[in-house]
């Protein structure tokens, strides 16, 4: 009985690992040379809250979430956080630090508390999963006064 249970547990773990690997293997390929960037903000900028953030893209096209055409994606803005290597194979969370622009928006008005903050753009596919390889801006640091 113990062997059969142990075998079932091991088989279940193997299936879970295979499925997680399959999910990563299904990441949407990005267009070679594609880039996302901040249009109106530079690293080290000082802003007054609320402030506008404009998103740029080269080499791919912005589309609404749920669009699965090659070469299309939508913006996600990371605020004071990063995505780990493991996070890059999964849908980007949706919370105050992971803003989704699944309507195809290319700008936003942010209200952040005074102090230093980091910002990064990440392009997601129709399912909010980063592309492979990821299309991400450099992390910039801004100061809100």
Image (cartoon, helix red, strand yellow):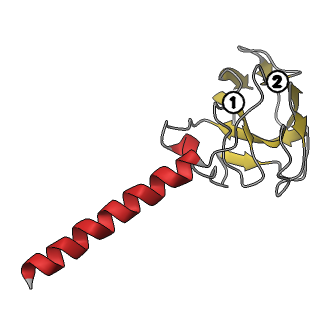
Task: Decide: is 20 above or below 56.
Answer: below
> At numbered mark 1, what does the secondary structure look like: helix, strand or loop?
strand
x and y percentages locating residue 99 in the rendered image:
73, 47
Q: Position of residue 75 (x, y in %)?
A: 80, 40
Residue ID at (65%, 23%): 139
Q: Nearer the viewer, residue 121 or 35?
A: 35
Which residue is nearer to you in this view: 45 or 127? 127
Q: Earlier in the sequence, mark 1 or mark 2?
A: 2
Residue 51's label in the rendered image is none
Circle 2 — which element? Answer: strand
Residue at point 54%, 47% (across, down): 24
- Asked whether, in this view, residue 13 is left or right of residue 82, the answer is left
* Residues at discs 1 and 2 in contact (Cβ within 8 Å): yes
Residue with the most extreme left position: 2
Q: Quadrant of residue 11?
A: bottom left
User: Residue pushed farthest bottom?
Assistant: 1
> How far is disc 1 from disc 2 in space, using C-alphas?
9 Å
Residue 70 left/right relative to 96? right
Mark 1 neighbour class, 10 Å CA radius: few under 14, some 14 to 19, many 20 or more: many
Query: Does residue 65 lie above or below 56 as drawn?
Result: below
Observer-nearest residue: 75 or 107? Answer: 75
Give the total of numbered labels: 2
The residue that label 2 is drawn on is: 38
User: Height in image: 39 above or below 49?
Assistant: above
Residue 145 percent across, percent down from the top left? 75, 26
Q: Is 31 drawn above or below residue 81 in the view shown?
A: above
Residue at the spot of label 1 = 119
Residue 114 locus on image (x, y percent): 69, 32
Image quarter where the N terminus lies is: bottom left
- Few, some or many residues within 10 Å of mark 2 (<14, 14–19, 20+): many
């Amino acid at each position: 009985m113990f062997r059969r249970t142990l075998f079932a547990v091991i088989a279940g773990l193997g299936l879970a690992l295979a499925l997680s690997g399959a999910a990563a293997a299904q990441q949407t390929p990005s267009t070679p040379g594609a880039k996302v960037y901040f249009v109106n903000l530079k690293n080290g900028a000082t802003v007054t809250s609320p402030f506008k953030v404009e998103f740029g893209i080269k080499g791919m096209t912005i589309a609404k979430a749920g669009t699965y055409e090659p070469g299309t994606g939508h913006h996600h803005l990371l605020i004071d956080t990063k995505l780990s290597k493991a996070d890059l194979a999964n849908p980007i969370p949706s919370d105050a630090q992971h803003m989704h622009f699944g309507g195809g928006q290319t700008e936003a008005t942010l209200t952040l508390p005074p102090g230093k903050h980091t910002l990064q753009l990440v392009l997601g596919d129709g399912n909010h999963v980063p592309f492979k390889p990821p299309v991400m801006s450099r992390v910039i640091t801004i100061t809100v006064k």
